[in-house]
Amino acid sequence: MNQAPAALRVAGLKIRYGRREVLRGLELDIAKGEIFGLLGPNGAGKTTLIRTICGRITPAEGAITIMGRPISRQTLRRIGLVPQDIALYPHLTARENLEVFGRLSGLSRSDTEKAIAWASEAADIKARLGDRIEILSGGWKRRVNIAAAILHQPDLLILDEPTVGVDVDARNGLHDVIHELSNAGMGVLLATHDLDQAEMLCARVGFLRNGVIAPQGNPRRLIDETFKGQREIIIELRQHPTPHQANALKTSGFASSNGNLSWSMIGRDAERSARDLSEAFERAGLVTREVRFREPGLDSLFVHLSRDATVAKEGSAG
Amino acid sequence: MILAMLRVMALSLVRDRGALAMAFVLPPTIFVIFAAIFSGTSGDELRLQVALGVATPSTLTERLETALRDEPSLRLLPGTASSPEAVIRLVESGQADVGVMLAADLNATTTSPVTIFVDPGKLMAGAILSGQVQRLIGLEMPDLALSRTAPDISSIVGGFTPEQSARLAAAIEQLAANGADASGQANLVATETVGPQGGSGASVTYYAGAVAILFLLFSAMQSSATLIEERSSGIVDRVAVGPAGTDVVVLGKFLFLTLQGIIQVALIFTVAALVYRVDVVNHLGLWLLTSIAAAFAAAGLGLAVAAACTTKQQAQTISTFVVLVCSAIGGSMVPRFMMPPWLQDIGWFTPNAWTIEAYHGVLWRGEGLLDLIPELAWLIALGSIGALLALLVSRWRLRL
């Protein structure tokens, strides 16, 4: 049986900067129509991976194929790249920008017109085609940023933080656009720090750390496999804990965020009631504002994996 | 608190190499260049290129020629022309800044025995040479000065007695043998302006070319900085995955900057033609060719600088530096003939010197295409090298 080629296949990818190995045998497959969320801390190598896929960095080892074909000038045409910044000409209108990028993506003048009609429909920007980019709001700019990358109907769409700096409504609108594009058959590589976004949008996610993407899989399945039905306890404090109290929380397995006012833990106290926990904290001199339970999400998994990495690093350093 | 702010400014300056260079390297560099230029104009280091002609060689012309060749502020072209026409040709062609023709009889009093031929664009060179010739005659050939003055004095006093005439002849002989200071020569040196059109058009032509290349460089540098904006905004990343890669970004800008430059130059020369009667219309083809080559060179240089810089601020600093230095030593601010020879030689490495020469050649000297080949070739080579560097550096940056 013939299987459709993957929109993107990365096998055994190794990238070195001098002596430093940034990617160490990275594996990644993205099917047509699939949205894959690439997660990982800053400096993990997300940008390096994107640049390598875009043909800008030559791998030390490994292979990359797009729709079954190795990277070449021709196959690069099957990629649409949405950079993190607004990669548009601010003094030009949205339509003029799309005309420029349509021509630069190799479309003829008449095909560019058709492509603008299609992309502006897909990104839902028809109403603002005549406006200059410099006067558009962040959300509209982000939409045009995506439209400019899909004019040539690529097989693989790479989105680098596509919703940075936009409000909730605009973000939800952009999610709809990305969904529509995957439904149209594009493989989507979504590099993001927005874990809620990844959980909502992606069929699969992968954590890039230590030069490989592991673990990777369906977000829900990864969360379930990692936390095995445990719940996450989140405690919001009214006052900052003393160093002694903070230390006690850490040794109890809590991790802090929001300047030590918010603490969370997954696991053994999950079955205790909120009232029990609140009383226990108050006995320890900690005044709680809120105690709540929730299903762990990707953010919980991210914290969990980051903590593992920190422990491993401290272990190897010690 | 004020000290905290001062520390911020100091650290920012120390860590921004471009700003550091602008603050501490550019001022002394510009000073050295301008000091060299203006010390030249004051005569300390000025060395005019002079074409010498001698109608009929004699003892006197040989003595004057030797004095001229030994004078450190003058550089006489090798060889001696035998007719005024030959000297004029050397001046008109730009091979010499100024020319001097010595008559057969340097004692002649009815006409000036020394004629200086000067390009109207370099009138100061004529005045300087005239002064130098008179000084040298006074210093090195006082006998000539006195013998030229004697007939005038004789007619004023109603003739010399035989005894006075004998003493005068002996004095002239002694001056010829020993030398002494004397001055007051009458009509010894005459100055003629040369050139196909005469009048003030030459200096306007010179400055039209000088200003044209100055603004070509400024606007090319300014517009090229958009390359850095496109790089930082991700536009170059986006285009890089397209079929043409980043080359189209660089080449598209190169084409635009060249066209923009031609229009800018056209505006400058339109004003020159309408207000100062610079004859562009009759040399339209070669003027256009020169303008294309100059705009081409400025575009290449601008893009090379922009490609090499990492930030827009750095590009602004470096381009200001490049434009100021090129314009200063290339003749856009002060005519190059007024600079010391070593600075004139360095000036040939700037697009300004070649552009000014080309425009002056076309519009003033009426040169043909063959005469212009060195200027055009140099400008086109500079533009091509700049564009090639911009292409290669842009490709290389993508791989960082």
Image: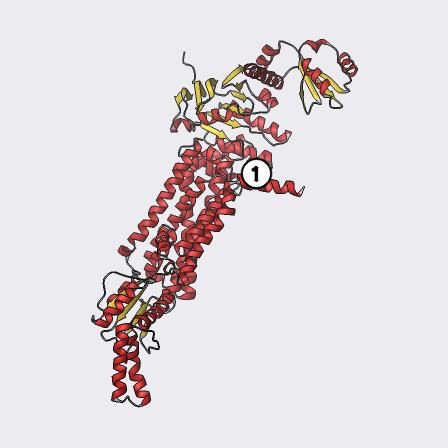
Above or below, A145 relative to B133:
above
Q: Nearer the viewer, residue B37 or A102?
A: B37
Residue at horizontal 59 percent and vertical 35 percent from the top: A138
Disc 1 marks a residue whose amino acid type is: Arg
Q: Is residue B263 visible?
A: no
Q: Nearer the viewer, residue A208 or A185?
A: A208
Relative horizontal placement of residue B384, taking residue A223 as reference (left or right): left
Relative horizontal placement of residue A140, taking residue A19 as reference (left or right): right
Residue B81, by quadrant, is bottom left
Which residue, given by chain and number where applicable, does mark 1 sit on?
A128
Residue A1 in picture, x, y percent from top left: 41, 11
Q: Residues within 10 Å of mark 1 (few under 14, many from 20)?
A: some
Residue at horizontal 38 percent and vertical 68 percent from the top: B200
Residue at horizontal 63 percent and vertical 42 percent from the top: B5
Q: Chain of mark 1?
A: A
Q: Is residue A29 visible?
A: yes
Q: Which quadrant: the N terminus of chain B?
A: top right
Residue B155 in picture, x, y percent from top left: 30, 87
Above or below, B185 relative to B27:
below
Q: Nearer the viewer, residue A154 or B357?
A: B357
